[in-house]
């Protein structure tokens, strides 16, 4: 059985727009992917609300810096055959770094961590799939608009930056925006249909990567 780590933020955790609740287990995209792969793979959903690629968020107790927590996940869940990383949206909400290129540089560091991690006996270097998150959209929610509204146009650049990074580093690439759109209830998160769509769309690419 193959092991797949899905490393992300609230879009991987399953944040339900407008409710501050979590989507049902069977609707969250990592679990939809798992259902599509059947008994051939074990899919680990590792999503944290607010997680960034490499940037600190001192407003909360939990460590949202993805570069600091990724090594723990690699060690905890090894051996791994594939690591899927979908991060970047939260990188855009902070003043002074509101560009998708900043998220691309952060993603580059995460790829480096996966490739250079000292895996134990019986483990080999996993494949890496870089996933561009769905684009942000306009919302009437004042709080989310203040946090992300300025970055809507910039979020459209995720796909081209991440695709180039994947090409340059020998990773796989998937654009979640090709199958999913943010819910205008808050302009960032996904409704159940759209998070399911990501998992469904990943089944065949992942089968190909892992030769299932």
Image (spheres, rainbow, N blue to C red):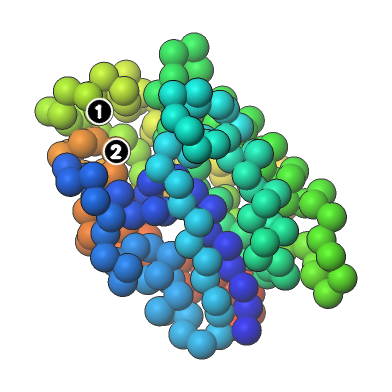
Q: Is residue 175 above or below residue 61?
A: below
**Furthest residue toward right:** 121
**Of residues 171 and 53, which is closer to you in this image?**
53
Could you tell me which secondary element the residue under label 2 belongs to?
Answer: loop
Q: Quadrant of the C terminus?
A: bottom right
Tell me what residue is drawn at x 55 percent, y 36 percent: 63
**Furthest residue toward left:** 140
* Mark toward the viewer: 1 or 2: 1
Q: Are marks 1 and 2 in contact (CB under 8 Å)?
A: yes
Q: Is residue 70 above or below residue 53?
A: below
How many numbered callouts?
2
Could you tell me which secondary element the residue under label 1 belongs to?
Answer: helix
| Image x and y of residue 5, in percent | 58, 62
| Image x and y of residue 99, in percent | 48, 22
Disc 2 marks which residue? 188
Specify whether 73 is left or right of 17.
Answer: right
**Furthest residue toward top:** 96
- Mark seen at residue 144: 1
């Amino acid at each position: 059985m193959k092991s797949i780590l899905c490393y992300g933020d609230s879009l991987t955790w399953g944040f339900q727009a407008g409710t501050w609740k979590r989507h049902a287990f069977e609707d969250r995209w990592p679990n939809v992917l798992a259902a599509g792969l059947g008994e051939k793979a074990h899919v680990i959903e590792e999503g944290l609300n607010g997680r960034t690629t490499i940037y600190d968020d001192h407003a909360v107790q939990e460590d949202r810096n993805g570069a600091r927590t990724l090594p723990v996940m690699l060690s905890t869940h090894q051996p791994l055959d594939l690591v899927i990383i979908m991060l970047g949206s939260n990188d855009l909400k902070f003043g002074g770094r509101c560009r998708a290129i900043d998220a691309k540089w952060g993603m580059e560091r995460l790829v480096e961590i996966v490739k250079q991690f000292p895996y134990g006996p019986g483990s080999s270097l996993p494949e890496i799939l870089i996933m561009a998150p769905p684009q942000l959209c306009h919302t009437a929610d004042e709080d989310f608009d203040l946090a992300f509204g300025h970055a809507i146009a910039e979020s459209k650049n995720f796909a081209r930056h991440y695709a180039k990074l994947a090409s340059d580093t020998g990773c796989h690439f998937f654009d979640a925006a090709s199958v999913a759109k943010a819910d205008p209830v808050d302009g960032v998160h996904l409704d159940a249909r759209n998070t399911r769509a990501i998992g469904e769309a990943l089944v065949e690419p992942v089968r190909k990567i892992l030769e299932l």
